[in-house]
Image (spheres, rainbow, N blue to C red):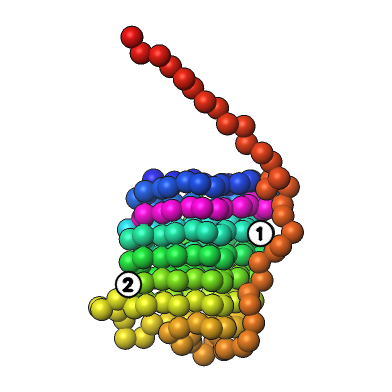
């Protein structure tokens, strides 16, 4: 029951959509374990704009869990989640291989959330017993900026893989307002490395504060220059 699943796609644009889903509103994928690794076709150069998501049991945008062919250069902006489990979620585990890198998000609004940020390095779930348990996924270059969230139960659950941490995480200009029944500890972090700037509540120690603005590419992708044709239908009624 995902909304839109770009899988092993290059140069794709998703915009001006309102999705109500029983699972992820947008789930970015590129193949599962040894099959995704052998096929080797990443999802890249993906633009997501003006997305509104309602998904009480899953994410506004999920990266994975089927990401073994790689996911890179994803640009999401002007996105809104309402009554949704999490904002951007990264799902992977040992045995997945592949990578998720160069992810850019700006202009995210969230209302009534369980988690604002969620990264999971222990997602498990393999298609069969033939996968390589030593296939390490690489998660790096994750950039979130210009974020407002309210009525949030927990700011973040960020869990990398022991011995294989998620790196290059950047969160800047983010204001999270907690729900009345929020968790006592708003951040849970393990096996991650990164920085934050202008983030409240105060992030975990693995994301120290620096004065910076997380990167968002200014150079457009080819798909952004494509002009859609508009169709108009006029009918007459007897």
**232 or 25: nearer the eye?**
232
Measuring 31% from the left and 86% from the top, which residue is drawn there?
Answer: 184
- Residue 219, given in percent of the width and then of the height, sits at 74, 59
Tag 2–tag 1 contact (CB < 8 Å): no
* Label of residue 119 in the image: none
Residue 47 lies left or right of residue 79; in this view the side is right
Assess disc 1: are there few (<14), some (14-19) or many (≥20) residues with their C-alpha within 10 Å of its C-alpha: many
- Residue 132, given in percent of the width and then of the height, sits at 60, 61
**Above or below, 28 relative to 140:** above
Which contiguous range is marked in magenta?
43-55
Question: Is residue 65 something that shows in the picture?
Answer: no
Question: Is residue 29 something that shows in the picture?
Answer: yes
Measuring 45% from the left and 77% from the top, which residue is drawn there?
Answer: 175
Task: Give the overall secondary structure of the magenta segment.
Answer: strand
Residue reaching furthest to the left:
181
**Above or below, 138 relative to 33:** below
The residue pinned by badge 1 equals 72
**36 or 141: nearer the eye?**
141
Q: Secondary structure at mark 1?
A: strand
Residue 80 lies left or right of residue 206; in this view the side is left
The residue pinned by badge 2 equals 151
**Res 167 quadrant in image:** bottom right
Measuring 36% from the left and 54% from the top, which residue is drawn there?
Answer: 54
- Residue 47, given in percent of the width and then of the height, sits at 61, 52
Magenta highlight on residue 51: yes
Measuring 33% from the left and 61% from the top, which residue is drawn there?
Answer: 83
């Amino acid at each position: 029951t995902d909304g839109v699943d770009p899988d092993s796609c290059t140069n794709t644009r998703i915009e001006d959509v309102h999705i109500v889903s029983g699972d992820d509103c947008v789930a970015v994928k590129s193949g599962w374990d040894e099959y995704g690794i052998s096929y080797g076709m990443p999802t890249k150069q993906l633009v997501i704009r003006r997305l509104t998501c309602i998904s009480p049991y899953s994410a506004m945008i999920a990266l994975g869990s089927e990401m073994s062919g790689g996911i890179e250069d994803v640009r999401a902006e002007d996105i809104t989640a309402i009554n949704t489990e999490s904002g951007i979620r990264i799902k992977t585990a040992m045995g997945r291989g592949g990578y998720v890198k160069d992810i850019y998000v700006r202009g995210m609004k969230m209302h009534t959330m369980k988690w604002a940020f969620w990264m999971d390095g222990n997602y498990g779930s393999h298609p069969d017993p033939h996968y390589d348990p030593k296939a390490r996924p690489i998660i790096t270059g994750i950039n979130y900026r210009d974020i407002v969230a309210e009525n949030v139960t927990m700011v973040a659950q960020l869990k990398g893989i022991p011995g294989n941490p998620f790196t290059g995480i950047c969160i800047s200009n983010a204001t999270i307002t907690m729900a009345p029944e929020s968790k006592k500890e708003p951040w849970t972090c393990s096996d991650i490395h990164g920085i934050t700037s202008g983030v409240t509540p105060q992030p975990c120690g693995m994301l120290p504060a620096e004065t910076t603005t997380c990167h968002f590419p200014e150079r457009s992708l080819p798909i952004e220059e494509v002009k859609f044709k508009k169709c108009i239908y006029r009918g007459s009624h007897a």
